[in-house]
Image (tube, rainbow, N blue to C red):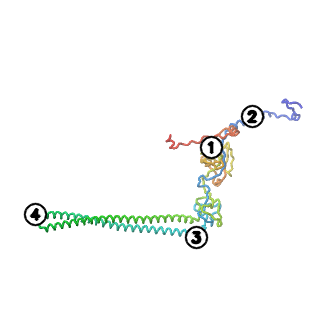
Amino acid sequence: MTPARSGFPVLPAMEMVPSLPGASRMAWFLVVLFTLLAAALLLAPWQQSISGSGRVIALAPTERQQTISATVDGRVVRWHVAEGTRVKPGDLIVEVSDNDPGFIDRLRGELSHARDREESLADRIAGIQASRESALAAADSRVGMAVERTRAAERGLQASDATLTAAKLNFERQEQLHKRGLTATRSVEVARMELDRAVAELERSRNALNAAREDHRATLADRQKVEADYTALIEDATASKASASAAVRPIETRLARQSTQQVRAPRDGVILRLLAQPGSEMLKAGEPLAILVPDTNDTAVELWVDGNDMPLLHASDHVRLQFEGWPAVQFVGWPSVAVGTFGGKITLLDATDDGSGRFRVLVAPDPADEPWPEHRYLRQGVRAKGWVLLRQVKLGFELWRRFNGFPPSTSAPPTQSPTPAENGKK
């Protein structure tokens, strides 16, 4: 055994194996190549991302899975659909029978009685209004007669006043003539009697005028009383009619609900589950009968992300999606190389978590990217995995970040144009 120049002993067997020519150069070449490859990888671009998992749902809340509920208390009589049946709006789904078979007939009787009372009160109001018109016409006639009597009394008073004036002048003339001896005493006495009669007649005319005016005021008061009495009767009858109408509406509502014993499909879709057994199971109004999955072409993906990653996300961030059952090869750091993934954009970030620290992110299709698979491949409930794309960094920086446990680099949120109110404040 002879020592080698490197200081290690050289075994006889090793001396028997000849070295390949250029092996040393090949080794150095591989070392250099590996070093350059490692350096190139460290300087290669890397797409940072945040991952989340979820499922496919409808974009509009009204097109998501919904429950068809019982409209009345009762039991299922007959199903007209099965699980997987496709329905259209108005298609009969199930017939429900009320627990009390005679309940609808009693409701109809109550409704008929309430409507009859409402009609009778309406007729009563019409009759009172007609009587009111007749009574007011009669009162107006009495008022007119009182007005005429007052005018006649006024004319009588004027005539009596004129007669009194004439009697006074005649009496004074007779006295002057009597003093001169030109007339007899009898003429003076007759003139005095006529003056007294004129005074009495004037007093009687005044009394008649006062009586006529009092009668006029009495007829006016009587007319007001008639109008007030009939107005009170009409208001009382109107209140009774309103109460009867108010009693009709709840009965009509209950009858309409009880009569809706045929539950129909609200929209296009597929019956997913039947939740009630016919005949044996008692139901209450509002209890679920079936689950309907509406037809929709506007799908979205509901992703759940960790609370630590939530501050890094913004609306309109780009997302790469991988759907369950669709063949795909995903490269997280190089999304352009991935195959079978689809693009999307964040449209909604929930304001609160689900109670376990996860936040919901709603992702809609990206119109600038490849369309998502057809509806038959992308039904509601299909599982999906998503990667929200952040900034592009060097692979070396990404390895250093992960080694030190630093969060990903985030870009600034997209700027929004100011509102007119904000412009005004500025």
Marks 2 and 4 sit apart, C-alpha to C-alpha, by: 175 Å
Where residue 177 sits: x, y (%)? 12, 64
SS at mark 2 in the image: helix
- For image coordinates 60% across by 68% down, the residue present is 100
Question: Disc count in the image?
Answer: 4
Quarter of the image holding residue 139?
bottom left
- For image coordinates 16% across by 64% down, the residue present is 171
Q: Name the residue type under label 3.
A: Gly
- For image coordinates 31% across by 64% down, the residue present is 214
Report whether 134 appears left or right of 393.
Answer: left
Q: Name the residue type under label 1.
A: Pro
Residue at the spot of label 4? 180
Q: Nearer the viewer, mark 1 or mark 2?
A: 1
Report whether 30 appears left or right of 125.
Answer: right
SS at mark 4 in the image: loop
Residue at the spot of label 1? 311
| Along the viewing direction, whichever of 387 and 373 lies nearer the viewer | 387
Q: Are marks 1 and 2 in contact (CB under 8 Å)?
A: no
Is residue 366 visible in this depiction of the protein?
no
Q: Is residue 3 above or below residue 416?
A: above
Residue at the spot of label 2? 32
